[in-house]
Image (tube, rainbow, N blue to C red):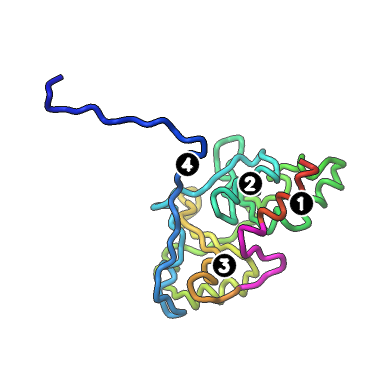
Amino acid sequence: MTNKYRKIPVTTLSEHCGLSSPNFKIEEGLTLDSAAVRLMVDFTQTSATTANDSINVNDALELMRVNKIRALMLIGHNGEFAGVITAMDLMGRKPMQFANEAGIRRADVLVKNIMLPKYKLKAVSREEIEHSSIGDLVQTFITQGEQHILVVEGQNEEMMISGIFSATDFKRALGITIDTPLAVHTFSDLERVINEHKEVM
């Protein structure tokens, strides 16, 4: 090699070194009349946080807390999209109810036992979203009674999940609270539940 190139300095990783992940940033100046797409987490731009559907509920909660998200896209043993698990699912009655029925500890409940499977999920089309307002989305959230709405592209075998809306983002952007039972508003809620169930991990 010639003297044209230099050796780039290297450094040792610190004890607390972690992994970066893209952050969804709320735009300023949004109103109910603003384009709905401005509040969408776009999976074509930011990779969705995924997990195997065989992880347990405590690991799923921890993954959500670390990644500052409230919904995980789950992958089945065949490598295909299997369903969704939300913070509401994990922090509600589902894990303990399944544990009692199966005669196991809550910590041994797998997300696939309580997730919303693919065949039960509903979504809005990206084409519709591109012509909708944030106000339209608020109305849809209220009608569906959910904290998350998926966005899809294509039809049948070509259908792909390309984004997601979270009710929490409406609160951060516009101060609008879309309440459903056991709604999760802060990451401290996740930490609280994790700590409450440490004795059964």
The quadrant of the image that shows the C terminus is: top right
Dot 1: within a 10 Å radius of its alpha carbon, few (fewer than 14), some, or many (20 or more) residues? few
Tell me, yes or no, whether the two marked residues, 1 and 2, touch with CB atoms within 8 Å: no
Which region is colored magenta? 178-189
Residue in the picture at 45% in, 66% down:
39
Q: Evaluate if marks 4 and 2 touch, with contact meaning CB atoms under 8 Å apart.
A: no
Which residue in the structure is indicated by mark 3?
A: 167
Tell me if 37 is positioned left or right of 198 in this view. left
Secondary structure beneath dot 1 equals helix
- Residue closer to the observer: 112 or 187: 187
- First in sequence: mark 4 or mark 2? 4
1 vs 2, front mark: 1
From where the camera sits, is residue 27 visible? yes
Of the residues tagged 4 and 3, which is closer to the observer?
4
Mark 1 / mark 3, whichever is N-terminal:
3
Q: Nearer the viewer, mark 1 or mark 3?
A: 1
